[in-house]
Image (tube, coloured by chain):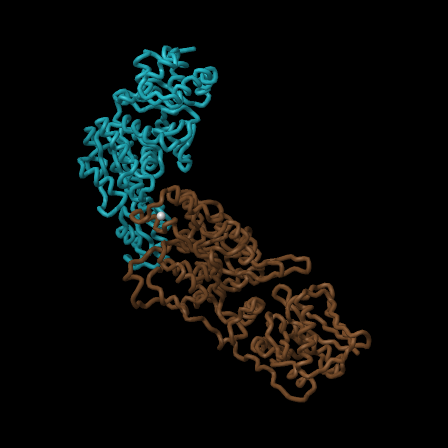
Chain colours: A brown, B cyan
Amino acid sequence: MFGCVNSGAILGIDGYPVQVEADVCNGLPSFDMVGFLASEVREARERVRTALKNSGYELLPARTTINLSPADLRKEGNYFDLPIAIAVLVALGMIPADAVEGIFFIGELSLDGSLRPVNGMISLISMAKKEGWHTCVVPSVNGKEGAVIEGISVYGMESLSEVVALLTGKQSFQPVEPERDYAAAQYHGELDFADINGQESVKRATVIAAAGMHNILYVGPPGSGKTMIARRIPTILPALTKEESIEISKVYSICGLLPPEEGLVRMRPFRNPHHTISPTALTGGGAVPRPGEISLANRGVLFLDELPEFQKSTLEILRQPLEDRQVVISRVHGTYVYPTNIVLCAAMNPCKCGYYPDRSLCQCSVAEVHRYLRRISQPLLDRIDICTEVPRLPYREFMGEKSNVTSRALRYQVEQAIGIQKERYRKEEILFNSQLSGGKIKTYCPLGAEEEDLLREVFETMELSARAYHKILKVARTIADLEGAERIQMEHLSEAIGYRSLDKKYWGR
Amino acid sequence: MTKEEYWYWFCTIPGFGAAKLQTILAWCGSPKEAFRLSPELLEKFPKVRAKDVTAWRKSISEIDLICRQYHQLEKQNIQFITKEQAGYPGRLLQMYDAPMGLFYRGSLPLDDVPSVAIIGARGCTSYGRETARVLGKQLAQAGIQVISGMALGIDGAGQRGAIEGGGQTFGVLGSGVDICYPKENFALYCQIPEHGGLISEYPPGQKGLAQLFPVRNRIIAGLSDCIIVVEARKKSGTLITVDQALDQGKDIFAVPGRIEDPLSVGCNELIRNGAGILTGVEEILDFFHINAPKEMTGNKKSLKPLANEEKIIYSCLSFQEKQIEEILGETGLTVSQAMIALLQLELKNYIYQPQKNYYARCKDG
Ligand SMILES: [Zn+2]
């Protein structure tokens, strides 16, 4: 007697199909599992047997063999309890074989037969839909995540006996209601740029960063509001599309970090790991690979506060993901790919005590100021297009009601600029000005004679590095896009020059 | 051995400073005689300790090597001059502990040309740095030699200004003249020999050690007719130099500062104790009875007319730097307008950025 059901597991952020086969025949009583299994999958044996017994299905002494295929992928996680139990019941003839066709099963069983949620549900249901299966049977807690994917029925079940009742038609259930109006459920959070008084130049730099997805560095003394501003970047990034939301949610679902009672992440992420974070926790990895902070920040903001406090080695491994927009982790059993489309935002004090160049407060020696700056990894600094100084404002400036520009208004500007870029780069593999490189800069950021002259003069008098040249052009391109200008003009270039990155050589001379 | 070789040996014995050598020289009459001094006799000189005798004997045993080093000076482009030779700075001869010999690259300050030291804090404000630079430049334009220690902050800024003004500046080092210390000032280190000279009483190869700097400061004071202190904290190294200058009977000028600025506490204290108040280069010119040269009143300001926003911004700036946020608040301009105007003003030499996104007027515009 033989039973076979569909299930799946996660590799990277995507699901892949797994067939669960059960064979029950006469012979010495046993319960064996094969198919390249991690130890936690082997433990399913005890849970499934006990759950079946406690749900009222007596297993007669028989030789039971479970096979999970494909055999070349190592199966990990607690996904397979339910599909194994169902396959056994099909093999025993308690559920007709045709009742499980085209149905995807997933879930962990507790000993009393109730179903427990598993991580990565969005990836799994997306996969089930792609495989052409018509129905998913998942633990009820995961049901809300199922509601996100359209075009497939998802049943959220409480227990094994409910699942059997569903399949044998003894009881009828309603599939989870799919969410119809995605846009209406958009959420931008409670933070708003209107909360911040003054800091106009910093706000402006931030809007430019958001509009071209440029990485940005804030330099300023403690208490100047660097973190307040950074936290508000997600509020001016364009509204999430459903596809983006699903992409973000897949990562959160795998990590079990989805907000309670929510199937989707509806806000652009803002992650601010502490400076003691390990390289693995930052970019992802481990024996059983998991996404790192940089992937949890996907489509949002990764904020590194106190940048010089981070280990240089930790920061330097960010370089590749920032360039490739994904993290690739290779293991013997497979290659894990996590997305890393982020805006990197960093903040730092100008010196150890934080008050340089205000010499009435800063007592750091010149050497100390230099040493502090030298702690930042140059390769990382090279990937930051915009640098802005955040001054300490007098108390009266900071507090009190003022009519400040709202996040909503700023987001509108950003969305317009991003729309222009999308149109301009429709034939390219890039989406944003920050992704321009080499020859493409020449193509898309041409300068008139007057602008060329200005840039040459600035380079000669300010002794800027060659690397700064490309950054200034890319940022000027974004400023022009914010103004809706086709060509980069003097004013765009002048402003971009004001946001040029720190040049260590000229710091505190 | 030649006379010069004996002098070179005499000036390079580790642990023997100018004062100790002076007493030995007075007793022996010449380095050649000193070379034959018996250790027993040497020990009897005041302040000569056992380890000094060891160093003395070691240097005598290595005399061949030392002579070879002497002959390498030329290849290193380093000159050596002793107290007894013509061309040794006359101002130094007034000191009881004048260096026995000087190593230098470039030239030495001239006796009949006025000479002023610009000294001050290493960790100075950008206001202080700009003040020192402009003073250095104006002194140079008036034909005055600018002496300093090529340190970070005020020292280096004053010397940069002097070079900018097309004058002569002399850097007195606390290391051998073949060593650039601090290394941040490498560009200045390379320029000075062509616009004056690098001077040291230590032989080539001597590293910059903390204990050597106060000793070299007496030479800075010694080479100058008066001393300008631009910024100094309370109880700072700069004030030690001032004390040495006072001991040598030199006049002190201090740039006054706001009473709550820690970097002006030293200067204000000097003024209270009788130093001259320096509010402009004119006070120094008066001191030397020099008339202000014509080019000093002229400036490099571009003749291009200023746009309206540029005027608004220029009038809101001062010599004390302002952050862009403050400028926006005071002028009511948008970020983009202000950035354009600031960049233009900077390119036209009206203002400069002491620190990124901080702006101040150029003193000499
Ligand atoms: Zn400090």
Quadrant housing the N terminus of chain B: top left
Residue A279 position by quadrant: bottom right
Residue at 66% across / 69% down in the picture?
A: A9
Q: Quadrant of residue A64?
A: bottom right
**Can residue A377 be seen in this snapshot?**
yes
Locate residue A355, reporting x and y percent. 34, 51
Residue positioned 70% across, 70% down in the render: A18
On the rendered structure, is B277 left or right of B339?
left
Rendered view: B219 above or below B327: above
Residue found 70% across the figure and 75% down from its top: A84
Q: Nearer the viewer, residue A11 or B277?
A: A11
**Can residue A477 be seen by looking at this rendering?**
no
In depth, the one of A13 and A57 nearer the eye is: A57
Residue B307, percent across and down? 31, 52
- Percent x, y for residue B64? 47, 15
Question: Residue A11 at what x, y percent from top left?
Answer: 64, 65
- Number of numbered discs overlaid on the protein picture: 0
Q: Is residue A302 left or right of residue B150?
A: right
In the depicted structure, whether residue B150 falls above or below residue B85: below
Q: Is residue A123 left or right of residue B45?
A: right
Quadrant (top left, top right, bottom left, bottom right) of the C terminus of chain B: top left
**The quarter of the displayed image where residue A285 is located:** bottom right
